[in-house]
Amino acid sequence: MDAETPASLTVLNSESIDKLPGVNMDDRLRFVPGFTLLRRNSSLTANPTTQGVSLRGIGSSGASRTLVLSDGIPINDPFGGWVYWTRTWPDQVDRVEMSRGATTSVFGDRAMGGSIHLISPSPSQEQIALGIEAGNRSTWMPSGSYTNLFRGLYGVTTSMRAFTTDGYFIVPDTIRGSIDTTADVRFLVPNVKLDFLGGENRFSVKSDILVEERDNGTQLQNNSTSLGSVSGNYARSFGQNGLSLLGFHQRQQFHASFSSIQPDRNRETLTSNQSVPSHATGGAGFGTYRGSSLNLTGGADFLRVNGTSFDYLQPSGLRQGGGTIFQRGLFAQGDVAWKDFRFFFGSRYQWTGLASSSSFYSPSGGVAWGRRWIRARASAYRAFRAPTLNELFRQFRAGNSVTLQNPNLRPEVLFGVESGIDITGERTRFSVTAYRNELTDLISNVTLSFTPALVTRRRENVAAALSRGLEANFRYQQNAWVVESAYLFADSRFDNGARIPQVPRHQGSAQLGWSRRGLAITGGGRAGSLQFEDDRNTQLLPGFAIFHLTASQQLPKGVATHFVIENALNREYLSGFTPQPQIAAPLLWRIGLSWRGSLQ
């Protein structure tokens, strides 16, 4: 077995992705313990600003502490750090590579907790895919894609997905009032990618658009986003060595309305309309050297983000905040082999673009040993995350819970160590990893005041926190049967002993799948123990367990049908407080029909 990396890796191929429920990738990745958004809500109903992802229980304030890439290009929102998961169509993802921990120095501050790479399929000979899905709560999702490869060199891939649903109520029936409506989403995502696949030169350019509208659960609260991005990636090979250049530009407009809600939920008053235009430009260049025992990578990158939050207060007034952050980084990463060992080393120096902390140094190192079916690994690293423009300048409201901006935030700092063992047999895979992360200046939503009518929080650098844990993954395959399970124990606490909000101590998932002659059936579930909504540990979210079932059948002439049911037992469980309780998704089902073929 190759000792290729000291990181804890999870790789999902297209077959594994297809067997998981969920319209977008966030709901499918929740089956990897430790993958969490700010709250338990799905991206189908959650406000986009709460869709930042973290790994291993280091918590989230809405901004991601994990870098999410699509074909090498970051898709974390440059202004706020969250991820528009509606951009991620699982059918157009060939493989997911999830790396926990900042074990590499190649990535910048957004990868403080790890990275998630969504890799698209390569262009192929002409193939057309058409599909339609329908489900309860007036859910519809038409989709289509086209790919072709001309002369073996020029590839084109286009796709489009639309989605609409009436959604569901996000407050329990026992407290629901006349102002409550369903939370829903409507979105359209077209994109096109062009590839040149030369022998020594490879080039691709991609453009994608997102148009999204949401109703956030009351008569007056809603938001919308229009986003467009273009990216390019060039690679030149010199034998086993190479040079790569990549860049992207993104523009977007975010709108949201906020209201105050009476305790009986029978009256609400509009408090502000918010408009947030922003744009970002980023790029990187790096070279690689591949030798018989030594590998080296080195380069530089940059990210420039500009955005302003305009709050039009009701009945009158304007609150405005924003600015520009320009980050630059230099990095080097390498590994050297000696017998059955491989040693890793890396360094990164980054200028943060912040007056409070202008630069940061991130070293990393590790070792991996592998022989036949077993691999052992260990690593240590220091990483950071600079506050986003959203955290510095934008105020946010969810119901009667207000989170204030803080222009004086400092970067978060993490020092981590981990070690683990991976075992791979003909039918069995097992891995276990223990880790310890020390966090200083962690940005958290600190409660300033709490009343039934209004909760006021502000983003603050808390003194310190410690996250320790153990994660394990198991997979066994016997003929047509596959058993998979995963578990994470995460003890994440501030230095005063209080637990970090939104982090359960125990998370787990399990699945049993069977497939034969074009028929595939998978059933399973995921569970999480209790967690807290707030930094004071007063708002308790009890543990939960939900179950799902997926089934697909391949039919003649490229036709296939599939069925998905999420939260199959219709379990009601809490997802958050605003300060009144909110609930996560009820039973949802979809049935779909698809066709793949060509015009030839």
Image: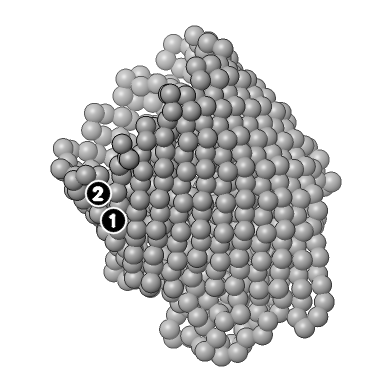
The outermost residue toward the front is 600
Splitting the image into 4 quarters, where does residue 573 fall?
A: bottom left
In this picture, is 304 found above or below 376? Answer: below
Q: Where is residue 279 in the image (x, y as percent from the top left)?
A: 71, 50
User: In front here: 257 or 362?
Assistant: 257
Q: How many marks?
A: 2
Q: What residue type is labelled 1?
A: Leu
Q: Kindly tell me whether residue 169 is visible in this rendering.
A: yes
Callout 1: SS = strand
Residue holding disc 1: 593
User: In front here: 89 or 346?
Assistant: 89
Q: Position of residue 310 (x, y in %)?
A: 77, 66
Residue holding disc 2: 559
Q: Which residue is drawn at 72% across and 36% down?
A: 302
Q: Kindly tell me whether residue 35 is visible in this rendering.
A: no
Spatial CA distance of label 1 from label 2 is 7 Å
The reply to whether callout 1 and callout 2 are in contact (CB within 8 Å) is: yes
In this picture, is 60 found above or below 583? Answer: above
Q: Position of residue 433 (x, y in %)?
A: 43, 38
Q: Residue at x 82, y 72 (%)?
A: 318
